[in-house]
């Protein structure tokens, strides 16, 4: 009986870490992983393994800061670095997240179009449902909805098993680095990092741990949550890459969107594979349209001292619910524009997110190593080594991302 109570207690704490990485596997994420698998087969799996370690360390830092300080990341940035830095970070975060939110409503539209439902029906209905579920619920109720979406990601695992990969080859590729120095490979690799470690994840995770009101005694269970979350999130990514590698890559089919991947699987892996992939895309997109506007809203309200949190009523937190509503309505409306090309918007905003990510990570390292803020809970040497390697690596790849097109102009 005692063990049963303890298990229920632990399960009550687990949530923010799992939800955060699940939201990272959104429409843009699925499209990126499907592109990695269809274009390069198993060649980038080793990179995903390294990213998983970095992600786990970063998410643990977030959770630790939340539990020790009882404050969100943007709150700590404002208090320690002033309003100007907060305004800079929040402006770019809003632009990047707004673009990602548009991409996720496009993901809802694309997934349901595979079942013959027009975007003019699917997008308004889902936009209203998302808005209603978030604005009319407490944090506990909303978290249960978010966690329920975890089940949907099993569709990718089932799809992958159905296409019968050679697991020996997969395992070998996962532990054997394979690097190609051509531009497309580097840009795709950047895309994989950018969609796995994103700025909104850091803000959302820390705010949701604060909103949950976890104490330092409960921290060891929240640490388990973020580690499980990092492993689970990247395991889903792993199965998407393997699934598209064993089917599309072997057949010489390259794609650049998640719905294209679902359609391309049909002749190679059967109708069920397409249906499962489409269901996964729909679930991932819906979850992200909840999480991404919510994480943006939390961050902005914390940064400028507005009342925030799902446990507050609309009257108590008008700005909080106002920003959330604006993001949902406007991003859904943009997807409904006839013949609109969303690729350009998504590419630019992903690049902005990629540039912002190291900035946010640097703030995090400085904050978590500040003994005045964290006391004895500062980073150890290994954690600092991993985080700084990650930051330098992302900055280097971001520079390559911007320099490559300029160099290309001179070469051609």
Image (cartoon, grey):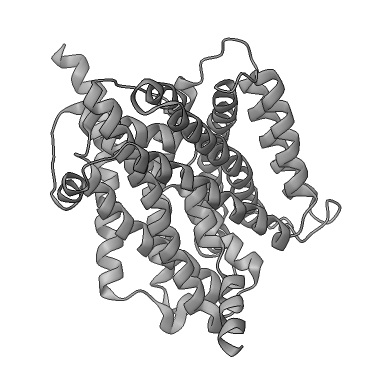
Q: Residue furthest bottom?
A: 2
Q: Is residue 226 above or below residue 289?
A: below
**Location of residue 66 (image quadrant):** bottom right
Residue 289 visible in rendering: yes
Left or right: 135, with 163 as reference point: right
Most foreground residue, 172 or 79: 172
Most foreground residue, 249 or 229: 249
Task: Give me the residue at 43% from left, 64% from top.
Answer: 228
Q: How many marks?
A: 0
Residue 64 visible in rendering: no
Q: Is residue 375 above or below residue 351?
A: below
Percent x, y for residue 93? 52, 43
Percent x, y for residue 177? 14, 47
Left or right: 345, with 393 as reference point: right
Q: Quadrant of the N terminus?
A: bottom right
Q: Is residue 43 above or below residue 316?
A: above
Q: Quadrant of the C terminus?
A: top left
Percent x, y for residue 227? 41, 65
Task: Give me the residue at 13% from left, 34% from top.
Answer: 180
Q: Residue furthest right?
A: 315
Most foreground residue, 307 or 99: 99
Task: Give me the residue at 50% from left, 30% from top.
Answer: 275
Percent x, y for residue 32? 37, 34
Task: Give me the residue at 51% from left, 72% from top.
Answer: 222
């Amino acid at each position: 009986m005692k063990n049963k109570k303890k298990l229920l207690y632990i399960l009550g704490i687990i949530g923010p870490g799992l939800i955060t990485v699940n939201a990272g596997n959104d429409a843009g994420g699925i499209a990126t992983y499907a592109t990695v698998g269809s274009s390069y087969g198993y060649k980038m799996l080793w990179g995903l393994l390294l990213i998983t370690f970095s992600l786990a360390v970063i998410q643990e830092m977030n959770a630790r800061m939340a539990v020790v300080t009882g404050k969100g990341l943007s709150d700590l940035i404002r208090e320690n670095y002033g309003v100007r830095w907060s305004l800079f970070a929040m402006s770019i975060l809003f632009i990047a997240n707004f673009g990602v939110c548009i991409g996720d409503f496009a993901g809802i539209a694309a997934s349901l179009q595979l079942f013959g439902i027009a975007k003019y029906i699917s997008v308004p209905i889902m936009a209203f449902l998302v808005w209603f579920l978030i604005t009319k619920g407490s944090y506990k109720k909303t978290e249960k909805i978010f966690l329920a979406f975890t089940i949907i990601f099993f569709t990718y695992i089932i799809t992958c098993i159905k296409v019968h990969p050679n697991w020996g080859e997969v395992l070998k590729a996962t532990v054997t680095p394979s690097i190609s120095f051509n531009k497309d490979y580097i840009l795709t690799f950047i895309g994989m990092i950018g969609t796995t470690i994103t700025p909104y994840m850091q803000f959302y995770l820390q705010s949701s741990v604060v909103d949950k009101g976890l104490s330092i005694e409960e921290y060891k269970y929240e640490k388990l949550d973020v580690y499980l979350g990092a492993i689970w999130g990247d395991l889903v990514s792993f199965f998407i890459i393997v699934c598209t590698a064993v089917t599309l890559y072997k057949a010489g089919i390259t794609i650049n969107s998640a719905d294209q991947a679902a359609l391309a699987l049909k002749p190679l892996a059967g109708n069920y594979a397409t249906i499962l992939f489409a269901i996964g895309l729909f679930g991932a997109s819906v979850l992200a349209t909840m999480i991404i506007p919510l994480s943006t809203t939390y961050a902005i309200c914390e940064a400028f001292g507005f009342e925030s949190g799902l446990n507050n009523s609309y009257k108590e937190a008008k700005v909080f619910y106002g920003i959330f509503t604006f993001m949902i309505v406007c991003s859904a409306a943009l997807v409904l524009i006839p013949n609109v090309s969303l690729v350009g918007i998504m590419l630019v905003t992903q690049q902005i997110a990629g540039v912002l990510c190291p900035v946010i990570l640097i703030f995090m390292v400085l904050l978590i190593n500040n003994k005045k803020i964290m006391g004895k809970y500062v980073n150890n040497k290994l954690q600092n080594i991993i985080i700084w390697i990650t930051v330098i690596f992302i900055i280097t790849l971001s520079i390559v991302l911007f320099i490559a097109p300029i160099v290309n102009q001179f070469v051609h």
